Amino acid sequence: MSINSKTLAPYEESLSLVKQVCYYWLPVILHAGSIIFVSSLSSLPRTLPLGLDHVSDKIWHAAEYAVLGILVYRALFYAAGSRLRSMACPLAILAAGLFGLTDELHQWFVPNRQADGWDLLADTIGAAAAVGMWRWIGLV
């Protein structure tokens, strides 16, 4: 049996899918996992390097969800197919907001932590602002 381009086509397509998953979706999964890890800690460090311990926790929430929003937007735009491309912006914001909701619910069950609606608002605003700017600048 000889190997030709028709024989290799399904393998190339699946390899392309693996590359898409690794390049676009793996960063989403890793960043979401880091958010879950930090949310699972019963206590957070009291001091941060460079004097960053005086920054409001709402800024930290907005920043971490800004990154999540951009990563989800990028994945939806490039790797979720043409049907979702036109809806990538609102879907990324929705996904980040829903993930923020599940994160706050998760913190409800972590000792010494609490669910906070203001944190959820900061999460969603951070994701919306970052995705909106990312799209407006034209990076995607």
Image (cartoon, grey):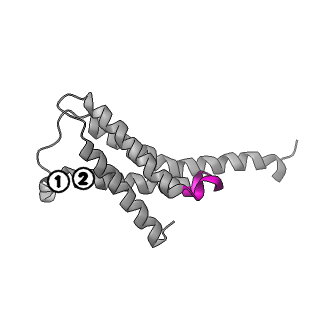
Residue 65 point in image, percent of width and height? 35, 51
Amino acid type at image mark 1: Ser
Amino acid type at image mark 2: Trp
Tell me if 113 is positioned left or right of 73 in this view.
left
Q: Quadrant of residue 30?
A: top left
User: Circle 2 sits on which residue?
Assistant: 60
**Dot 1: element:** loop
Which disc number belongs to residue 56? Answer: 1
Residue in view at x 33 percent, y 55 percent: 125
Q: Count the labels in the image.
A: 2
Tell me if 81 is positioned left or right of 106 in this view.
right
Q: Quadrant of residue 115?
A: top left
Q: Is residue 72 visible?
A: no
Magenta residues span: 77-87
Residue 62 among magenta residues = no
Residues 25 and 81: in front is 81
Residue 67 point in image, percent of width and height? 37, 55
Q: Quadrant of residue 105?
A: top left
Residues 14 and 4: in front is 14
Residues 71 and 58: in front is 58
Residue 42 point in image, percent of width and height? 20, 32
Residue in view at x 65 percent, y 48 percent: 15
**Dot 2: element:** helix
Q: Are marks 2 and 1 in contact (CB under 8 Å)?
A: yes
What's the distance in space between the residues labelled 2 and 1, CA to CA?
Answer: 7 Å
